[in-house]
Image: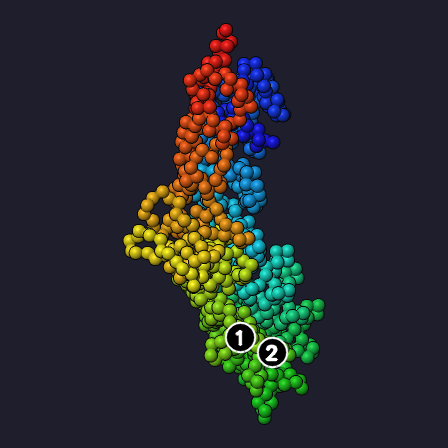
């Protein structure tokens, strides 16, 4: 009903629909309600529009036009009709205040008023064509985009707050794809416009754990490998490294290992509540193991480690394997026997720091004695072995200590490098090496962790003299080793028995931590050979743009995007035409070089008369549209490709024009010129009646106002009636009134007719 009233009312004002009576009495009596109009419109004078005589409507309408005061406000004031409300928009929205006061004849003012309207306010006109998430993003924006932003192609503002998820709802929300899906497209466009790197922007916030196909559980604050939590401490540390730290050169091994202790690297668990270390479920009580476990890895890499760091708080008894009974204040041997020898007790009570600094002093009593003697051990000269009671001592550290001469220790101090000579770090950590199998064991379990194996196989002397370069061990580790993969002699990586073929995983696996921590490391190296389809997971159900980018290497993504048509971004596609067996006629095209790219199919059948255009990139013909420009010399670009949506419907008008633009060449002038030069035939089929039937369908949109004015102003009343532009229900009475005139009212233009009718009515009133 609203649209019919709007059409009726506008027709009255512009002269497109005129209802007049054959006589003064009829014109004064006939009202809109006479024709069934039933509205609530009341003008400023309190008069109902339904009850206004049509003669008053005509006269007031002509007066608004003649006074150059035709606006939404003046129409509402004179007739009570709210044109904004009739369009289904919120008339109370202050955005429309400026538009309401603009004269329809003021094209510049009208354009300016329209341009300032927010896109979210116009959403009702789109009938749900725009995703609700996009409309919500427009509404929530601190600077909501306007119609001006859209027509000027300010995509930074139009897409501000809009995510890829809002545009492509079927995209995943987990892993790297989920991170990309959450990116603000407006910020993405702004980044590209300022020379930003597309890959860095899209992957910002992603971590190595995402690349390793782990899933981060926000609720439990933990990484998951499938359904199982990742427990390896080193892998967890690496998984938390952000890819942006690698791309901007801020990543380093030292940064990664900050606050990490050696115990964590060894696979021990630290209970924050009890402040105790555990090896699996067993509490670690050995003081030496605890001292080593508490060393910060950064102390090993930055040169701050010293023997005092290791021995701080340790007693000699701790190092020799004694256990101090706090309740009885006594030392006990490994077999549980209480140490009673005074000298042994004294030595056991000495701090390791005192021993290392040479502060240990004993009289001649210790001359010729070894530490093993005073510790109650027995040396078997025949076998050359030390025994604790009946048990042979096999611990290398204990044996080396037992061999130390007490007087030498008194005079020169305890040389830790000598004590650990021939030992490995694994020996100090309580691991056991099986020489036959060439394997290390932690209790009954074989040690397989790469980093642990590299560390425990180092000479213990390097730990004692501070020369152990833990950073170099970590730097030389390949990511594949950290990820639990194995590399064979041919350089192939395996996950168990399965060869790894994924290019991204292979690229990462082959790099060492040292390479990743280099300041000049190029992150693009990890993406070499990796396609968009492999990274995102493109399927046959994915949008057209994702399918077209599927085989594109990530490093060429930005380049490929610039080579694409906007139609690909809009999820449209072109229809390929197989020309084999078809008769073709070349279209005359003027280009820098002769072109054979535009043809017309002349073969009888469904394609007869169809334009086709050859794409020099894909080497295929696609359906095209005929040239709609008003010129005699054509170029290839005159013949736009015909795009289709996913349901097989043609993309008409503006959609097809925008689809034919390249992303790299897209700017506001291209878009505006294309739209304004579009013929009316792109918006509607040939009109058999109505005001548009008076206008040639080849008229461009830019010439429409002038063409409408000229057509209505110059057309005879008879022509207007025949074409249904106006409706006269009293034609016979008018014929009678004008029967003696030289010129029939049917031959008059609408202006002549109104002037003539007013004149006749005035003369009747006077008489």
- Relative height, residue 231 to residue 167 (above, below): below
Q: Residue at x 63, y 85 (%)?
A: 392
The reply to whether residue 140 is visible in this rendering is: no
Secondary structure beneath dot 2 equals: strand
The residue that label 1 is drawn on is 499
- Relative height, residue 410 to residue 644 (above, below): below
Q: Residue furthest bottom?
A: 382
Q: Quadrant of the N terminus?
A: top right
Q: Residue at x 34, y 49 (%)?
A: 634
Position in image of residue 540 (x %, y %)? 54, 61
Q: Residue at x 56, y 68 (%)?
A: 265
The residue that label 2 is drawn on is 446
Q: Residue furthest right?
A: 327
Marks 2 and 1: which is nearer the front?
A: 1
Q: In this image, 495 relative to 605: left or right?
A: right
Q: Residues within 10 Å of mark 1 (few under 14, many from 20)?
A: few
Q: CA distance from mark 2 to mark 1?
A: 24 Å
């Amino acid at each position: 009903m609203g649209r019919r009233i709007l059409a009726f009312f506008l027709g009255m004002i512009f002269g497109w629909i005129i209802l007049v009576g054959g006589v003064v009495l009829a014109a004064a009596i006939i009202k809109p309600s006479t024709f069934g109009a039933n509205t609530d419109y009341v003008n400023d004078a309190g008069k109902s529009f339904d009850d206004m005589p049509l003669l008053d409507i005509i006269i007031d309408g002509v007066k608004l036009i003649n006074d150059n005061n035709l606006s939404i406000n003046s129409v509402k004031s004179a007739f009570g009709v709210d044109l904004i409300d009739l369009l289904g928009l919120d008339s109370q929205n202050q955005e429309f205040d400026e538009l309401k006061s603009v004269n329809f004849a003021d094209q510049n003012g009208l354009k300016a008023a329209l341009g300032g309207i927010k896109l979210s306010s116009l959403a009702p006109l789109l009938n749900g064509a725009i995703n609700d998430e996009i409309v919500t993003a427009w509404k929530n924006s601190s600077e909501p985009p306007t119609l001006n932003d859209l027509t000027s192609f300010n995509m930074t503002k139009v897409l501000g707050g809009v995510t890829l998820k809002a545009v492509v709802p079927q995209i995943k929300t987990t892993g790297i794809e989920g991170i990309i899906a959450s990116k603000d497209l407006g910020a993405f466009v702004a980044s590209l416009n300022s020379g930003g790197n597309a890959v860095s922007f899209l992957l910002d916030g992603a971590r190595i754990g995402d690349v390793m196909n782990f899933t981060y559980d926000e609720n439990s604050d933990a990484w998951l490998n499938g359904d199982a939590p990742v427990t390896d401490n080193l892998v967890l540390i690496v998984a938390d490294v952000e890819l942006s730290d690698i791309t901007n050169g801020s990543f380093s091994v030292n940064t990664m290992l900050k606050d990490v202790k050696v115990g964590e690297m060894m696979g021990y668990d630290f209970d924050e509540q009890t402040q105790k270390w555990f090896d699996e479920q067993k509490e670690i009580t050995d003081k030496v193991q605890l001292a080593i476990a508490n060393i910060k890895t950064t102390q090993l890499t930055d040169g701050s480690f010293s023997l005092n760091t290791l021995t701080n708080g340790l007693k000699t008894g701790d190092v020799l394997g004694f256990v101090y009974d706090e309740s009885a204040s006594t030392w006990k041997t490994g077999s549980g026997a209480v140490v009673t020898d005074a000298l042994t007790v004294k030595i056991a009570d000495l701090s390791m720091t005192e021993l290392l600094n040479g502060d240990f002093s004993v009289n001649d009593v210790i001359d010729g004695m070894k530490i093993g003697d005073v510790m109650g051990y027995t040396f078997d000269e025949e076998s050359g072995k030390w025994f604790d009671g009946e048990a042979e001592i096999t611990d290398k550290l204990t044996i080396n200590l037992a061999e130390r001469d007490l007087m030498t220790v008194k005079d020169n101090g305890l040389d830790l490098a000598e004590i650990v000579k021939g030992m490995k770090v694994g020996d100090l950590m309580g691991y056991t090496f099986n020489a036959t199998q060439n394997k290390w064991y932690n209790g009954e379990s074989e040690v397989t962790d790469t980093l642990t194996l590299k560390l425990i196989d180092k000479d213990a002397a390097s730990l004692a003299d501070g020369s152990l370069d833990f950073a170099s061990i970590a730097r030389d580790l390949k990511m594949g080793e950290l990820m639990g993969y194995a590399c064979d002699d041919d350089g192939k990586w395996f996950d168990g028995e399965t060869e790894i073929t994924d290019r991204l995983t292979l690229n990462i696996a082959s790099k060492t931590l040292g390479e990743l921590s280099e300041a000049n490391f190029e992150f693009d190296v990890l993406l070499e050979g990796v396609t968009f389809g492999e990274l995102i997971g493109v399927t046959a159900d994915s949008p057209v743009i994702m399918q077209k980018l599927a085989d594109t290497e990530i490093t060429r993504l930005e380049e490929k995007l610039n080579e694409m048509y906007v139609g690909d971004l809009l999820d449209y596609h072109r229809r390929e035409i197989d020309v084999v067996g078809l008769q073709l006629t070349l279209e005359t095209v003027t280009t820098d070089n002769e072109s054979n790219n535009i043809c017309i199919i002349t073969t009888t059948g469904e394609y007869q008369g169809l334009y086709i255009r050859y794409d020099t990139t894909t080497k295929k013909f696609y359906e095209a549209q005929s040239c709609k420009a008003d010129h005699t010399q054509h170029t290839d670009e005159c013949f736009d490709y015909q795009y289709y949506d996913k349901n097989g419907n043609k993309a008409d008008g503006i959609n097809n024009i925008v689809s034919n633009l390249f992303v790299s060449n897209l700017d506001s002038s291209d878009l505006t010129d294309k739209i304004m030069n579009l013929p009316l035939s792109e918006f509607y089929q040939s009109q058999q009646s109505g005001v548009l039937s008076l206008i040639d369908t080849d008229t461009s949109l830019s010439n429409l106002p002038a063409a409408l004015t000229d057509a209505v102003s110059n057309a005879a009343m008879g022509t207007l009636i025949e074409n249904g532009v106006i409706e006269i229900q009293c034609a016979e009475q008018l014929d009678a009134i004008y029967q003696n005139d030289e010129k029939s009212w049917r031959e008059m233009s609408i202006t002549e007719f109104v002037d003539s009718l007013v004149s006749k009515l005035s003369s009747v009133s006077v008489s």
